Image (spheres, coloured by chain):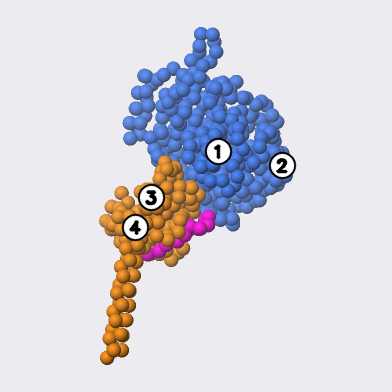
Amino acid sequence: MGNHRTLAIVVLSVGVLVTAVFAWHRQVLPVPPKAIRELKGVGVIWITKPQDCVSCQAITGQLRHLQAQSRVPVVVVQIGAKDRTLVEKALRYERLDASIMPLSYLEYRVRFGRTPLPSVQIVADGIVRFQMALDRPGKMFPDSAVAILRQTAISAKGGEGNDKEAQ
Amino acid sequence: MRNLLTFANRALLSIVMVVGCQSQDGAISTKEAAFQDVFLVVDSIILQETDSVINVGLNVRSDAEGNYLIADEREKQLRIYSPSGQLLIHFGRGGSGPGEFEYPVALLRSRTGELIAVDGHGRLTTYTPDATRLVRNQATPFHTVYDADIVDDSTLLLSGVSSETPEMRLHLWDIKSNRLIRSFMKIPDIDPAAASAAGIANATVHGDTILALFALSDTIYRFTNSGKTLEAIALKNIGFRSLTVPPPARNAGLDAIKAWTASFSMMSQVYPLNEGFIVQYSDRENLIPNWRLAIVDRHGVATVVIKDSPKLLTQSARGTVFTHPTSLTPNKWAITEPLQ
């Protein structure tokens, strides 16, 4: 009987501990900005420092063509707010139709956790479906990731959702 | 829309400011002016685009039929547009194989009609006049090519750098025998690191004369078609800022690079006018060029300077071609004539 009681206490304690850890973990999980969480349909999130925005030309070229084919919305999360003009001009030069979301480094860590910098994500209905660090020049979305975009965005080219987002 | 723009520009004729006016003692004074006060937009065109054709980094030339030949260095694609902006053909893609380009800097029409595509890494690709077939693929000793133009049936003018003659920027290249004829235009004595980072040269052929610029020098260089020096015309009163500090180390941060590139002006294009030249140069802010334009007389004295100009693309039989001053994208062009 005593053993059963001890076991019950242990099980209860473990349960409380797991619940507490889970609750704590939930609390510190990164919470992407509202604009990204509420992105309808598929979208591309490019998390970048201004200098990477200038140098990551391969991904901008790929995004430019994906936008030409699908009007997929692109959100550029700019880490560090002081070079916004540079980012705006670089995107205009690259003919990339993107909205810019400046975040401080601290906000970036809160919002994106351990997400590498710079990196790109494909999100669908606010959920990250694909993520890739832009850790070398010339890096582009692999075919598998483009397929995700094509399935969700390009096939829905005639659909209203993405078109509205892109405008 | 086109008529509206033309009308708006014509209306400006009535209120145009006097530029390059002669002062009482006879000296020419330089005036700052707005673009629309100096150039009349006689036509506007929008380049046709498709899912696979987007105009980004444009190097533009025109041929005898008035078509525009484009080498897009960012898209690594070559295009031919009609004078009205209709896409006639596009070809080429990224890569280093035949028909592929790493950094196309020029698409030229030879005197015999063939198309010659010049890659920034020194490779020449020749196509049939209709661009449907690749005729030959040639390597040259130039590791960097900035610009190119046609001299005659067999000679190409290349602006670039080879490891054999790193101090020379212009080269006459025999396309048929695939050999160097002559190198000329020695660059001024400047910091080698600066020459490597920003020592760009541009040159174009006009009749029997070559007009050239070295990016870090406010001078127009004139040569004969055989490379013999005619004159070096020092530019005056254009507000050119000379390079005074060496470039930052390779691992320097963005702020250092921005500060360095913002510290000097760079010459980029020169074209002849009836009584002088039109010169394009740039000052950089946040790494992005702000285009400047100067109209200079035959002695290099600026009569008018435009501080915020749309980008000068080329000079064609129809006029001087700019990106359209009201457009944020490079696929809308203004064909202009200088206002007298």
Chain letter tied to blue: B
- Residue A41: image quadrant is bottom left
Placement of the N terminus of chain B among the 4 image quadrants? top left
Give the spatial CA distance, label 2 vs label 1: 27 Å
Q: Nearer the viewer, mark 2 or mark 1?
A: 1
Q: Amino acid at mark 4?
A: Pro
- Residue B241, given in percent of the width and then of the height, sits at 56, 29
Mark with earlier residue (2, 1): 2
Give the spatial CA distance, label 4 vs label 1: 36 Å
Give the spatial CA distance, label 3 vs label 2: 48 Å
Residue pointed to by mark 3:
A103
Q: Nearer the viewer, mark 3 or mark 2?
A: 3
Residue pointed to by mark 1:
B260
Q: Are marks 3 and 1 on the same chain?
A: no
- Residue A16: image quadrant is bottom left
In the rendered image of the structure, the colour used to display chain A is orange
Give the spatial CA distance, label 3 vs label 1: 27 Å
Q: Chain of mark 3?
A: A
Q: Which region of the structure is painted magenta?
A: A129-141
- Residue B27, given in percent of the width and then of the height, sits at 55, 13
Pick the front one: A118 or B228:
A118
Q: Amino acid at mark 2?
A: Thr
Q: Which mark is residue A32?
A: 4
Q: State yes or no: discs 4 and 1 in contact (Cβ < 8 Å).
A: no
Q: Who's the residue at 51% across and 16% down the image? A: B29
Q: Which mark is residue B165?
A: 2
